Amino acid sequence: MLRPALIEHCKKETLLVAVIDNSIVGFCNYHRRKDNISTIYEICVDDNYRNKGIARNLINEVPKPIQLKCPVDNESNVFYQKIGACMVDTLPGKKRDLNLYHIGFSEDKLF
């Protein structure tokens, strides 16, 4: 994450940080759109703290509904499906196709 983006997310209060024993072990940055849908840009957890519910807890703190895109060949797809994200489409990306996920949408409000 580049420093200017980090500063901007801090100012907008759209950066969530997971801390254990005074150490940052994960973060999630997102954007709350004008239509009240949150778009997750990044979610990262230190390798030593994975599979402990940290990413799930970060996502739980993001205002719902949430939309996110993940490259089709990225291992994170397994995580998103595991937490109940609904894959609604596959879209062409600049370098590779992206799976589009929704979290917390009502069944009749799909974009």
Image (tube, grey):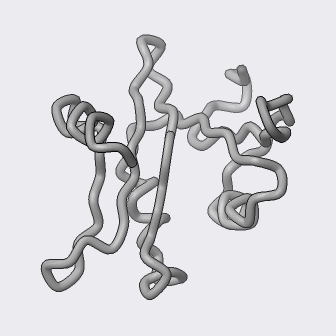
Instruction: Locate residue 86 relative to residue 96 in the image: left or right.
Output: left
Instruction: Locate residue 63 relative to residue 78 in the image: left or right.
Output: left
Q: Is residue 80 above or below residue 107?
A: below
The residue positioned 42% from the left and 12% from the top of the image is 34
Instruction: Locate residue 31 relative to residue 50 in the image: left or right.
Output: left
The residue positioned 85% from the left and 29% from the top of the image is 92
Residue at the farthest top position: 34
Q: Is residue 95 above or below residue 86?
A: above
The residue positioned 84% from the left and 34% from the top of the image is 89
Residue 59 location (% of width, % of height): 45, 54
Write down the quadrant of residue 77 in the picture: bottom right
> Closest to the observer: 47 or 40?
47
The residue positioned 27% from the left and 43% from the top of the image is 3
Residue 80 location (% of width, % of height): 67, 58
Residue 8 location (% of width, % of height): 24, 31
Residue 98 location (% of width, % of height): 78, 39
> Closest to the observer: 30 or 46?
46
Q: Is residue 92 above or below residue 57?
A: above
Looking at the rendered image, the quarter that the C terminus falls into is top right
Count the labels in the image: 0
